[in-house]
Image (spheres, rainbow, N blue to C red):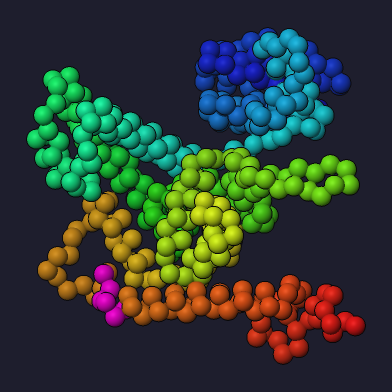
């Protein structure tokens, strides 16, 4: 078996070949599609090519994967951890990749399909635009802070009333120039963000998985697209714990010797943008009627609001795994709110408005339907609180008896008086 390591750069790739227990240099090839394809045609059909998952690694893999036996993307963090101290050159790095792959100790990275890659690019583009808009807004706040100007009389400084208040301020010429320039940049960013969000809305409407995620309160189109961009194929996660660990919402564990394990903060591994949108949705769920709000309040009473929000984000990741694996909508969904989300997405993609027309299916439900759905959510929240109260009173149980009311003869508790 032949294993080929590629140390990828912008202009060239360093090649190392591992065969029959020996590693030799293979020279350099240009990072050019035609050159890479010609080189791949000359490689043995059964060869395995390994390269680190860097910015241009996926494009290189798409070019050469049709002409070689297998293309493997390596985790850069794991490769750096396996590297020894001392000299570091392109030839050494390529040889390390080939050697790790040949020995079977290489940590691989999943290569997404083109649709998932497009979702990731859209989410990344929107995130960068939002960051640029935030920087411009912060510059305006800095001008107000430097000028000892008090709090504005409006809630939104960048709305119609806020802009009128900013225009009426008496400021030095350079500060006025800064505010006017920042407002123009904010308007430009708003337009670009709207274009990207319209494309995201189109993709969400065409994806059954993303539409299913919209049934969760607090999950919008950007959240659903970000999660599916990070997850890709849900079948690659055998359990919900694997998904939680991939998203970096699992606690760090430190344990050595006979001492007990110590759990610390979350690992924060994996895609940070997906973790960010989950936490944002968790903040919303912590204020929305339902079982997750009761869970948030229960954890907040012991650990504080921040820890409780992260705990809700972790539970939300578990719920998403079950929904996508079982092809089921959220159990405590509110249909009227879900229809409103979908209608807004349709309008963002250019759908015709129905003002003044009778529509066979009411998009914005009447007040009575909203109240009925809220009442069902209150009942679900009350049921969760009763479940937790019974669990604390009876102690931890195992088997079917762990759910009160499901069986008439629950399993006996470990260490209870019934065992004596």
Please name the residue shown 18% across and 46% down the image: 153
Query: In this rendering, does residue 260 appear at all?
Result: yes
In magenta stretch: residue 99: no
Please name the residue shown 43% across and 36% down the image: 124
- Relative to the observer, which residue lies in front, 356 or 172? 172
Query: How far across and how far down the image is residue 19, in percent?
Result: 82, 21
Please name the residue shown 11% across and 29% down the image: 170
14 over 359 or under it: above or below: above
Query: How far across and how far down the image is residue 405, in percent?
Result: 65, 86
Query: In this rendering, does residue 44 appear at all?
Result: no
Total tally of numbered discs in the picture: 0
Query: How far across and how far down the image is residue 276, in percent?
Result: 48, 45
272 over 306 or under it: above or below: above
- Relative to the observer, which residue lies in front, 288 or 126? 288
Q: Quadrant of the N terminus?
A: top right
Please name the residue shown 53% across and 16% down the image: 10
Report whether 225 appears left or right of 342. right
366 over 354 or under it: above or below: below
Looking at the rendering, which quadrant does residue 66 occupy? Answer: top right
Report whether 390 appears left or right of 372. right
Query: How far across and how far down the image is residue 63, in percent?
Result: 56, 27
Over which residues does the magenta segment extend?
A: 364-369
**What residue occupies the far bottom of the structure in this picture?**
408
Report whether 396 appears left or right of 417. left
Q: Quadrant of the C terminus?
A: bottom right
């Amino acid at each position: 078996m032949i294993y080929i390591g590629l140390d990828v750069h912008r202009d060239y790739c360093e090649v190392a070949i591992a065969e029959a227990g020996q590693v030799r240099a293979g020279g350099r090839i240009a990072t050019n599609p035609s050159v890479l394809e010609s080189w791949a045609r000359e490689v043995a059909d059964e060869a395995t090519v390994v390269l680190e998952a860097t910015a241009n690694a996926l494009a290189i893999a798409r070019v050469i994967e049709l002409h070689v036996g297998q293309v493997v993307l390596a985790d850069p963090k794991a490769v750096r951890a396996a590297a020894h101290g001392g000299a570091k050159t392109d030839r050494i790095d390529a040889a390390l990749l080939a050697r790790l792959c040949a020995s079977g100790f290489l940590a691989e990275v999943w290569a997404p399909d083109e649709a998932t890659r497009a979702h990731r690019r859209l989410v990344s583009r929107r995130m960068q635009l939002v960051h640029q808009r935030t920087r411009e807004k912060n510059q305006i706040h800095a001008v107000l802070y430097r000028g000892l100007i008090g709090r504005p009389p409006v809630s939104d400084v960048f709305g119609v009333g806020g802009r009128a208040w900013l225009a009426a301020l008496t400021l030095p010429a350079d500060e006025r120039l800064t505010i006017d320039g920042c407002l123009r940049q904010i308007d430009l960013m708003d337009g670009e963000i709207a274009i990207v969000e319209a494309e995201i809305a189109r993709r969400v409407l065409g994806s059954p998985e993303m539409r299913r995620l919209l049934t969760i309160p607090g999950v919008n189109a950007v959240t659903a697209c970000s999660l599916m961009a990070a997850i890709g194929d849900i079948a690659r996660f055998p359990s919900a714990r694997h998904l939680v660990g991939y998203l970096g919402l699992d606690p760090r564990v430190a344990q050595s010797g006979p001492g007990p394990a110590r759990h610390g903060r979350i690992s924060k591994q994996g895609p940070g943008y997906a973790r960010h949108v989950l936490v944002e949705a968790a903040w919303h769920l912590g204020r929305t009627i339902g079982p997750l709000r009761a869970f948030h309040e229960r954890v907040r009473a012991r650990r504080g609001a921040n820890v409780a929000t992260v705990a809700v984000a972790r539970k939300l990741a578990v719920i998403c795994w079950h929904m996508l694996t079982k092809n089921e909508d959220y159990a405590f969904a509110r249909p009227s709110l879900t229809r409103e989300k979908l209608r807004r997405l349709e309008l963002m993609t250019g759908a015709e408005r129905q003002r003044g027309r009778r529509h066979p299916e009411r998009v914005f439900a009447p007040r009575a339907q909203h109240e009925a759905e809220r009442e069902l959510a209150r009942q679900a929240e009350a049921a969760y609180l009763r479940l937790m109260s019974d669990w604390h009173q009876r102690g931890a149980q195992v088997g079917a008896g762990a759910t009160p009311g499901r069986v008439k003869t629950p399993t006996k508790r470990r260490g209870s008086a019934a065992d004596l």
